[in-house]
Amino acid sequence: MPKPHTFPTLYDDLKTVSISFLTKHGYLKPNQWQSGTITWSRNGNKTGSISIRVNTQPESPYLELDYKCNETPINYRVQLVSAPSNLGKGVVWYFVCPDTGKRCRKLYLADTYFYHRSAFRGCMYEKQTQSKKSRNLDKTLGVYFRSDQLFEQLYKKHFKKQYAGKPTKKYLKLTRQIEQAESIPYHEIERALIS
C-alpha cells in the first residue's frame, strides 16, 4: 500500500510579523507608543489584517496583537527585548516567542497565534519539499530561471548601483548572477529539462 500524501504547511505561505517591518515603518523608535495595522495581500487581493500596538518604553517593551481567528477575538502581548548592536550604533530588537521563549526576529501564524517557527510541528520551507533532482537542477540552472527576477531587482526604482563612487556589493552580486545565467549554453538547459 502506498504511503499517503502529506502536504506540509509551508513557512513561505504563512502570515508573518517581523522586526524589519516594524523598524521600516517607524514602530521601534525609542521611548514611544505607536499603533497601526498590518495588512497582507497576495496577487493584489487582501488576505488578512491585524491591529498592532508597540511600546518601546524601557520598563517593559512589547508588541500587542489584536485580531480575529475563526471569528474568535484574540489579543495578547509579545515581549520585545533589545541588545546593543555589534556595530556600536543603537540597539537590535527581538521578539520573545510567547510559546517557546526563544528570541527571534520573525513570528509566524500557522494556527491561532504568532509564534517562533520552532513552535509548529510539520511545517517546512518550500525548498525542503523539493525533490533531490529539483534541488540539483536549481543549483545548476536556477540562476537561469531567475534571470527575470534578477533584472527586475537591478532596475528597481531606488536601487543603488554605486555608493561613494564604488559599485555596491548587491549590484556586483546581481551582475555576477546575470552573467552566470547568460553563460549557460542552451543545449544544457534543454538536456536538463528533458532528463
Image (cartoon, helix red, strand yellow):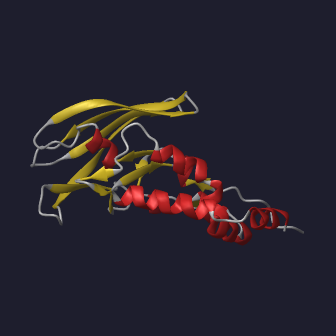
Q: Residue at x 48, y 58 (%)?
A: 175
Spot occupied by residue 192 in the image (x, y as percentages of width and height): 78, 67
User: Which residue occupies the extreme right position in the image?
Assistant: 1
User: Which residue occupies the extreme front position in the image?
Assistant: 165
Q: Quadrant of the N terminus?
A: bottom right
Could you say which quadrant of the image residue 143 lies in?
bottom right
Look at the picture and state if 1 lies above or below 112: below
Q: Is residue 171 visible?
A: yes
Spot occupied by residue 179 in the image (x, y as percentages of width and height): 55, 61
Q: How many marks?
A: 0
Could you say which quadrant of the image residue 134 lies in?
bottom right
Q: Residue at x 26, y 44 (%)?
A: 23
Q: Observer-nearest residue: 149 or 71?
A: 149
Q: Observer-nearest residue: 138 or 59?
A: 138
Q: Residue at x 16, y 42 (%)?
A: 29
Q: Quadrant of the C terminus?
A: bottom right
Spot occupied by residue 49 in the image (x, y as percentages of width and height): 44, 31
Q: Is residue 111 visible?
A: no
